[in-house]
Image (cartoon, rainbow, N blue to C red):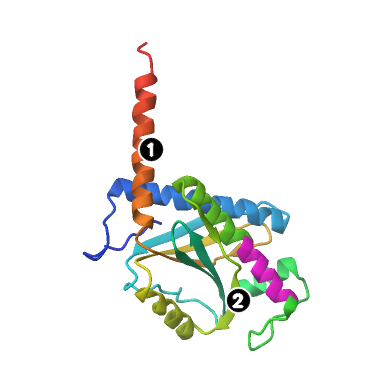
């Protein structure tokens, strides 16, 4: 499923073709994250499906209705040519699945608190998934961006939404991605929430223009039969 919310007048609009390219970009970036996740899990992990919403920040991100508290939220600041912030959100059910695969016998405390090993596992998973997406965005858009050292917080849904809401005064656009990573042992449905400055949209436009120019060049090189 691919869903796009309408932009406000203050946000540059993307054409349908530009939205299609953005979907392709995000899909490839998630596949790259799944490949990196496969190495950590020791088995093939695929992106079974994903939903994407692109919107101005005043359209606050929503969490899935079925989200089980507490949430474990990993935050990575995106630095470089384009400024942004990445949130990777696991609910209680996903957190239990993660430890069942990577730390059998390690139960999550009733209040959602994590010991050092559990925290390290989630931080490493964020390093793998978020870094894979950031690297793919950097390569595709031909811009220099990288993820800073991630942080981990445990909170309920209301506090998480309040946290996301505080980003609206600083950033211009957000991407809300819910992806399902599926394997024999693993069935995770994390939520990625990405806030970017408006520089991100011109970068998408440049990518589209380059693709169109490359397509025209290829056509011009085709010799008549």
The reply to whether the magenta stretch includes residue 44 is: no
Mark 1 surroundings: few (<14), some (14-19) or many (≥20) residues within 10 A: few
Q: Which mark is residue 211?
A: 1
Q: Position of residue 105 (x, y in %)?
A: 78, 75
Classify residue 203 as left or right of residue 7. right
Front-most of residues 211 and 62: 211
Principal SS element in the magenta part?
Answer: helix
Residue 217 is situated, as x and y percent measured from the top left of the image, at 37, 26
Q: Position of residue 221 (x, y in %)?
A: 38, 19
**Above or below: residue 188 compared with residue 156:** above
* Quadrant occupied by the N terminus: bottom left
User: Is-magenta flag for residue 119?
Assistant: yes
| Left or right: where 19 falls relative to 46 | left
Residue at horizontal 38%, vertical 18%?
A: 222
Give the quadrant of the C terminus.
top left
Name the residue that disc number 2 marks. 152
Report whether 142 appears left or right of 16.
Answer: right
């Amino acid at each position: 499923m691919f869903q796009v919310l309408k932009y406000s007048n203050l946000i540059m609009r993307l054409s349908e073709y530009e939205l299609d390219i953005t979907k392709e970009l995000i899909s490839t970036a998630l596949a790259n994250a799944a490949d990196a996740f496969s190495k950590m899990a020791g088995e093939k992990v695929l992106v079974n499906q994903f939903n994407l919403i692109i919107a101005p920040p005043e359209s606050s991100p929503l969490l899935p209705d079925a989200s089980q508290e507490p949430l474990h939220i990993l935050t990575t600041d995106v630095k470089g040519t384009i400024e942004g912030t990445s949130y990777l959100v696991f609910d209680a059910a996903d957190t239990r699945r993660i430890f069942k695969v990577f730390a059998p016998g390690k139960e999550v405390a009733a209040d959602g608190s994590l010991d050092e090993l559990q925290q390290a596992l989630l931080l490493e998973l964020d390093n793998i998934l978020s870094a894979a997406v950031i690297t793919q965005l950097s390569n595709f858009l031909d811009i220099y961006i990288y993820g800073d050292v991630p942080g981990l917080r445990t909170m309920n849904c209301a506090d998480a939404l309040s946290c996301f809401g505080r980003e609206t005064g600083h950033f211009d656009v957000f991407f809300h991605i819910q992806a399902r990573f599926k394997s024999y042992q693993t069935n995770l449905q994390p939520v990625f929430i990405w806030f970017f400055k408006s520089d991100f949209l011109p970068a998408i436009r440049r990518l589209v223009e380059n693709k169109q120019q490359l397509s025209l060049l290829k056509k011009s090189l085709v010799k008549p039969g």
